[in-house]
Amino acid sequence: MIRHHPSEATLLAYAAGRLPEPHRIVLRTHFALCPACAQTVRLATEIGGALLDEATPAALSAGSLARTLDRLDLRDPAVPAAPVPVTVAALATGRWRWIGPGLRMMSLRPRDAHDARLDLIRVAPGMELPSHGHTGTELTCVLQGAFRDETGVYAVGDVAEGDDTLEHRPAAMPTDETCVCLIATTGRLRAQSWLVRLIQPLIGV
Ligand SMILES: [Zn+2]
């Protein structure tokens, strides 16, 4: 059962097309497992489109909201299945880089013009990452296993959202399964640890 969903602000930003592609891919992965969020985004997109159709330089005319709602197909609750861009089965084909004991990382999209990038991280059961923060946003979706940090426990399908105020020390849950996460970030890693700062230039985070 999914317990951690993206914030409403993030869902609306997705619907409005205001998120970089790496963050969109992480969210689409969540939507494939979470019909509720997929439906929210679908409605927000449709309402946004319908309101744009109605937009005139003058104030909305009487009855325009009713017409907007009429135009939305609310009778069909079915959500088209979002494609899962990254599946655990597909992970075997990529190149995992060693970044520390029990930690490996795979770059899926290098840093783009919006300073956003997409990576996979693989953490052995029970392994802890060094404490760190980010200068931008971080959006994580768990693909396999589970991890915990100061904000909660995250299992398959759960989304963890962080901004530049978050300082955390994620650790894979000590289960049998290796934890695999899809992570979109903007900005750079902030770390106190000399070890992380040593590795940082090597992995470009
Ligand atoms: Zn959700």
Image (cartoon, helix red, strand yellow):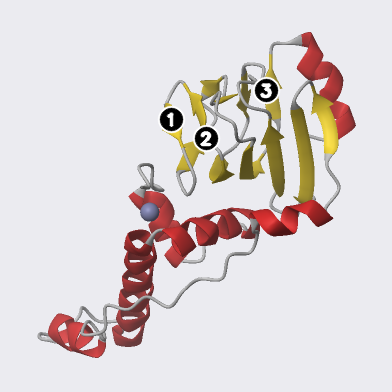
At 48% across and 56% down in the image, what residue appears? 30
Badge 1: residue crowd in 10 Å (few <14, some 14–19, many ≥20): some
Q: Residue at x 66, y 21 (%)?
A: 129
- In this view, the residue farthest toward the left is 62
Image coordinates for residue 161, horizontal then vertical, percent: 48, 39
Residue 190 in the image, given as x and y percentages of width and height: 67, 22
Pick whichever of labels 1 and 2 is earlier in the sequence: 2
Looking at marks 3 and 1 on the same chain, the residue that comes earlier in the sequence is marked by 1
- Label 3 and label 2: CA atoms lie apart by 23 Å
Q: Which mark is residue 66?
A: none
Residue at far right of view: 202
Q: Position of residue 68 (x, y in %)?
A: 22, 84
Which residue shows up at 57% across the image and 54% down it?
A: 26
- Label located before the other in sequence (3 or 2): 2
- Three-letter code for the amino acid on which mark 3 is drawn: Arg
Q: Residue at x 69, y 57 (%)?
A: 89
Residue 186 appears in which quarter of the rendering? Answer: top right
Q: Quadrant of residue 43?
A: bottom left
Q: Is residue 113 left or right of residue 88?
A: right
Q: Report if residue 109 is visible in the image.
A: no
* Amino acid type assigned to the residue bearing label 2 in the image: Ala
Residue depth check, mark 3 versus mark 1: number of the one nearer the observer: 1
Q: Secondary structure at mark 1?
A: strand
Asked if 102 appears above or below 6 in the picture, the reply is above
Residue picked out by circle 3: 190
